[in-house]
Image: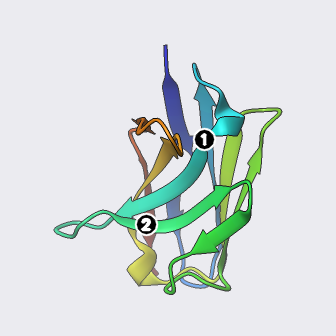
Amino acid sequence: QVHVVESGGGLVQPGGSLRLSCAASGFTFSAYRMSWYRQAPGKERVLVAAIGSAGGNYADSVKGRFTISRDNAKNIVYLQMNSLKPEDTAVYLCNARHPFLSIDHWGQGTQVAVSS
């Protein structure tokens, strides 16, 4: 059975940091491209960062502030978020996508709120 579970969200002041974690099980984690998306109220879900075998890539809005990493031994992907801004407020969702088999797994999301 596939499980994708995010954690680490919360309320933080502007300029602060959070580290999100996504723990996965039930599939071959190392074979999947792992991504973080976010969805703000009333807005579409957008890609924030992704990591595959070639490293990470980022949305322009988070470049230089966010870092995605993965631990294939623990089946966890992380999103380190620094210099947070109010516009980073959203539900952050973890996605696992197989590069060839068109298989997607999603977590339920974790809420991040940036406010003073």
Q: Which mark sits nearer the N-terminus, 1 or 2?
A: 1
Closer to the eye: label 1 or 2: 1
Residue 20 relative to residue 98: left or right = right
Q: Position of residue 59 (x, y in %)?
A: 50, 78
Residue 65 relative to residue 43: left or right = right
Q: Quadrant of residue 58?
A: bottom right
Residue at the image position 51 percent from the left and 57 percent from the top: 36
Q: Looking at this rendering, what residue extends furthest in the left direction?
A: 42
- As displayed, is residue 52 above or below residue 58? above
Residue at the image position 55 percent from the left and 81 percent from the top: 62
Q: Amino acid at mark 2?
A: Leu
Q: Which mark is residue 47?
A: 2
Q: Amino acid at mark 1?
A: Tyr
* Callout 2 secondary element: strand
Specify few, some or many for label 2: CA neighbours under 10 Å numbering under 14, 14-19, or 20 or more.
some
Looking at the picture, tell me which residue is in the foreground, 69 or 7.
69
Looking at the picture, tell me which residue is in the foreground, 103 or 15.
103
Specify few, some or many for label 1: CA neighbours under 10 Å numbering under 14, 14-19, or 20 or more.
many
Q: Which mark is residue 62?
A: none
Q: Give me the C-alpha separation between circle 1 and circle 2.
A: 16 Å
Q: Position of residue 12 (x, y in %)?
A: 54, 69
Q: Which mark is residue 32?
A: 1
* Callout 1 secondary element: loop
